[in-house]
Amino acid sequence: MNNRRTQYEIYWEILTYCKTPRSITQIIQRCNLNSKIGQEYVDFLVSKGYLGKTMEKERVLFTTTTAAKGYVEIFMKLYLELFKNSPEFRL
Amino acid sequence: METDIELTNAETKIKKEMKHFMALTIMSLAFGAMAMAFAIATITTNVFALTKTVSNMYFILFSLVIGFVVAYFALRYVISSAEVMSKFDEIQEDENGEKNLSSERITERIVKLMGLYREEKPQIKRMILVSKIAGVCFFANALIQTIIVFITFNSGTVELIPSVGGILVSLIMGVVGFYLPSSFHKYAICWDDRLVKSEEAEKKMASYMEES
């Protein structure tokens, strides 16, 4: 689904997906990004130390590091809070 | 423990909200289809009436115009409802009847719903407007039909029961036309509030990222 997501939502999606090592192609496909934008996001997360790079059979794989744990947790906490105190709907 | 309860609450809320929103979209789709059928029936009846009689010509012409307006808006409404429903259904399908979702899966659902709302916000606002216009048209049609019945009643050219039936259907559709946007409006208010709060959350995340 080509939803309008914010950059923080995309970061979270990438970090959650990369709990197991993933290639850039897998990340781009799973997070529904174009290759240029996808690469930019991944590069940013690598620069922050949230994603680690490993080589496997001449392929670069990205894995979420422990440094990203704080971001992932704060994101989930803040997003779950959005549904707190929201009204209940009745037809 | 508290987090578990919060998660269950969030999960229940999301599921309920999705269920209600889906029901509302199905209702709006049915309303759009009925409105279109009713408008086409009005057009057909009035076109035939126009060929038979010259009395009440202006009322018939006015009914025809309303019929065309409602048919056009109903078609747009059906298309909009179908689009929203299909995208919403895509998110619901991901759930696949799972129970006790993890915080990650719940957050993923929230992200998808936020994205869907951001994308469909103009569409939903349009649906609210179109539904209100259709409601006004139905009330106008009911009024015109009532006037026609009053004018032609003494001449004995009108069949009372079908005419009153038509007026009642118009009135009911008019009421539904106003009920649906008010329900969508409640969702829109809630989601607009969530979008504002998500912007505040973004600021917190941005400062967290800068610090780390």
Image: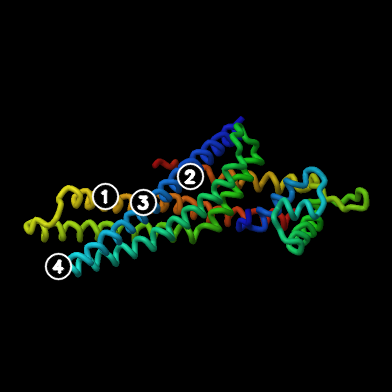
The answer to whether residue B127 is left or right of residue A49 is left
Q: Nearer the viewer, mark 4 or mark 1?
A: 4
Q: What is the three-letter code of the residue carrying label 3?
A: Met
Q: Residues within 10 Å of mark 4 (few under 14, many from 20)?
A: few
Q: Which mark is residue B84?
A: none
Q: What is the three-letter code of the residue carrying label 1?
A: Val
Give the image location of residue B200, x and y in percent: 58, 55
Identify the element where label 3 is drawn: helix
Mark 3 and mark 1: span between their CA atoms?
A: 10 Å
Chain letter of disc 3?
Answer: B
Callouts 4 and 1 in the same chain: yes
Which comes before the other along the chain, label 3 or label 2?
A: 2
Judge whether B205 appears above or below A88 on screen.
Answer: below
- Residue tagged by mark 3? B34
The answer to whether residue B123 is left or right of residue A12 is left
- Residue tagged by mark 4? B55
- Residue at 87 percent across and 53 percent down: it is A60
